[in-house]
Image: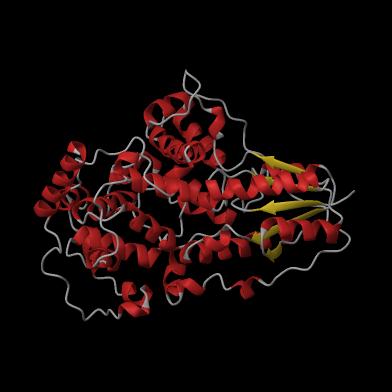
């Protein structure tokens, strides 16, 4: 009856949580712990604040089944070793993650614990299909999404696990940090109060979100997910990134709808598989999240920091749909997927700014930040990534706005929303009295021409 340490990370749920379920089934005392470790400490302002909300919700869920969430800060291995010593635990279990810094941490922890004589058990939970289980006919990994999708679309998955309803408590609970002492919301400053009105925190909210999507939005998903003025997407990216709902539960809900005749459910399933594809690539090519996936872009003449890039950040480029997208981001902590592509294309192509700048900014400001999906999205739109949009395919923001915001509702709403000024960094010293730019900082035709010339020169070099 030695305790089990359950190391929680991006899996803040009781339902379909393999590490938690296995620990509960042993009947042994279980000590759930979350560590503000060397990886989590690197997170940006919005993800740090948002996981704090998730931890608070998870702590309440665990209390409901007779457990506690122990919070500790420090290097993961050091904290786990200390807890093993304090509790007498002989097993540590967790659910696997696939991005380079997460894998490096977890591999080191597992090797060190096993050398200490502690059983270390990891489980499949964060994605639908683990990266090494999806192979091409020649045994390699996929670099293009469409054949990846064809490989996995009809694969069988085990049904989601039932929620854990009780945990055996240890005789004595180890000490825990106070969540408020971590200051996870410090980087958000005043923005936290604004974004708080747009979050859906915790497992129960996530499952309600899934049900609402399937029952009320799925039949209009294909068109609705691209309409900037419509709340037509599932919104589940926020909850999936912290594991407040499992990808498998979402997949089965989509499959059920598809088998019941809702053809648009296949597009939803494709989006879940795209998330998997991002982690597939991050696992097999760790450079995805840090550098150009295509090495030929290493010498590409992208700018880094500039006044133009700062105007993009502040939502004052003079291109209305781009600026509306950035303002939506600061108010809600999220950005419409179509708007992400438009804003990303304008930064990397019209403004000729390195995708890393945009990728890093999103990592600081998105509450649904996922390191693999974020990097893949940016490299796709910049042209430097796997299965990327060709560099010469340049989104025209005005054309996109006419197509996906025909009545200007998206642009008019976000360009006039005063909450933007209450959420942005104080150092920007912006107010609703400021005059909006009367022309783009880089004209669309000018920017396109410059980008195409840079692409041609690169190919001729």
Residue 64 shows in the view:
no
Residue at the limit of the structure toward the front, as seen here: 461
Residue 261, image x, y percentages = 42, 29
Q: Is residue 451 left or right of residue 167?
A: left
Residue 412, image x, y percentages = 21, 64
**Relative to the observer, which residue lies in front, 434 or 140?**
140
Q: Is residue 238 left or right of residue 26?
A: left
Q: Quadrant of the C terminus?
A: top left
Residue 171 shows in the view:
yes
Residue 44, relative to residue 354: is it above or below?
below
**Relative to the observer, which residue lies in front, 386 or 400?**
386
Tell me which corner region of the image, top left, top right, bottom left or bottom right, holds residue 191. Answer: bottom left
Residue 92, image x, y percentages = 76, 48
Residue 434, relative to residue 349: is it above or below?
below
Residue at the limit of the structure toward the top, as seen here: 137
Tell me the colour scheme of the image: secondary structure
Tag count in the figure?
Answer: 0
Residue at 21% across / 81% down in the picture?
A: 433
Residue at 48% across / 27% down in the picture?
A: 152
Q: Is residue 78 left or right of residue 391?
A: right
Residue at 24% across / 70% down in the picture?
A: 416
Tell me which corner region of the image, top left, top right, bottom left or bottom right, holds residue 417. Answer: bottom left
Residue 255, relative to residue 205: is it above or below?
above
Residue at 19% across / 61% down in the picture?
A: 320
**Relative to the observer, which residue lies in front, 119 or 321?**
119
**Relative to the observer, which residue lies in front, 202 or 86?**
86
Residue 324, image x, y percentages = 26, 62
């Amino acid at each position: 009856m030695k305790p089990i340490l359950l190391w929680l990370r991006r899996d803040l749920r009781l339902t379909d949580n393999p590490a938690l379920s296995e620990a509960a089934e042993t009947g042994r005392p279980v000590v759930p712990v979350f560590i503000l470790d060397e990886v989590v400490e690197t997170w940006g302002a919005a993800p740090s604040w948002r996981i704090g909300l998730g931890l608070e919700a998870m702590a309440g869920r665990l209390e409901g089944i007779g457990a506690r969430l122990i919070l500790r800060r420090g290097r993961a291995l050091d904290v786990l070793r200390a807890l093993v010593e304090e509790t007498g635990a002989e097993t540590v279990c967790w659910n696997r993650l696939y991005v380079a810094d997460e894998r490096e941490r977890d591999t080191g922890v597992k090797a060190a614990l096993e050398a200490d004589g502690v059983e270390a058990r990891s489980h499949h939970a964060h994605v639908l299909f683990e990266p090494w289980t999806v192979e091409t006919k020649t045994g390699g990994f996929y670099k293009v999404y469409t054949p990846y999708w064809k490989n996995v679309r009809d694969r069988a998955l085990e049904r989601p696990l039932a929620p854990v309803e009780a945990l055996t408590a240890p005789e004595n609970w180890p000490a825990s940090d106070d969540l408020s002492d971590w200051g996870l919301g410090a980087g958000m400053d005043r923005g936290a109060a604004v974004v708080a009105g747009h979050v859906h925190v915790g497992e129960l909210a996530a499952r309600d979100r899934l049900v609402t999507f399937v029952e009320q939005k799925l039949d209009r998903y294909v068109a609705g997910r691209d309409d900037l003025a419509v709340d037509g997407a599932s919104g589940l990216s926020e909850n999936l990134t912290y594991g407040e709902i499992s990808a498998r539960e979402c997949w089965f809900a989509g499959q059920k709808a598809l088998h019941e005749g809702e053809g648009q459910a296949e597009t939803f399933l494709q989006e879940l598989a795209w998330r998997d594809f991002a982690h597939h690539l991050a696992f097999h090519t760790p450079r995805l999240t840090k550098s150009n996936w295509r090495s030929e872009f290493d010498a590409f003449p992208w700018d880094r920091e500039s006044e133009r890039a700062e105007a993009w950040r502040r939502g004052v480029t003079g291109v209305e749909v781009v600026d509306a997208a950035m303002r939506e981001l600061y108010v809600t902590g999220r950005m419409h997927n179509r708007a992400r592509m438009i804003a990303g294309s304008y930064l990397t192509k019209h403004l000729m700014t390195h995708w890393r700048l945009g990728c890093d900014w999103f990592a600081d400001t998105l509450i649904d930040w996922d390191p693999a999906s974020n990097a893949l999205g940016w490299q796709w739109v910049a042209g430097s990534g796997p299965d990327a949009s060709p560099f010469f395919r340049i989104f025209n923001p005005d054309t996109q706005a006419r197509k996906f915001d025909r009545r200007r509702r998206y642009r008019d709403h976000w360009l006039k929303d005063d909450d933007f000024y209450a959420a942005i960094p104080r150092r920007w010293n912006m107010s609703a009295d400021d005059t909006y730019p009367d022309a783009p900082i880089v004209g669309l035709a000018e920017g396109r021409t410059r980008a195409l010339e840079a692409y041609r020169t690169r190919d001729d070099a």
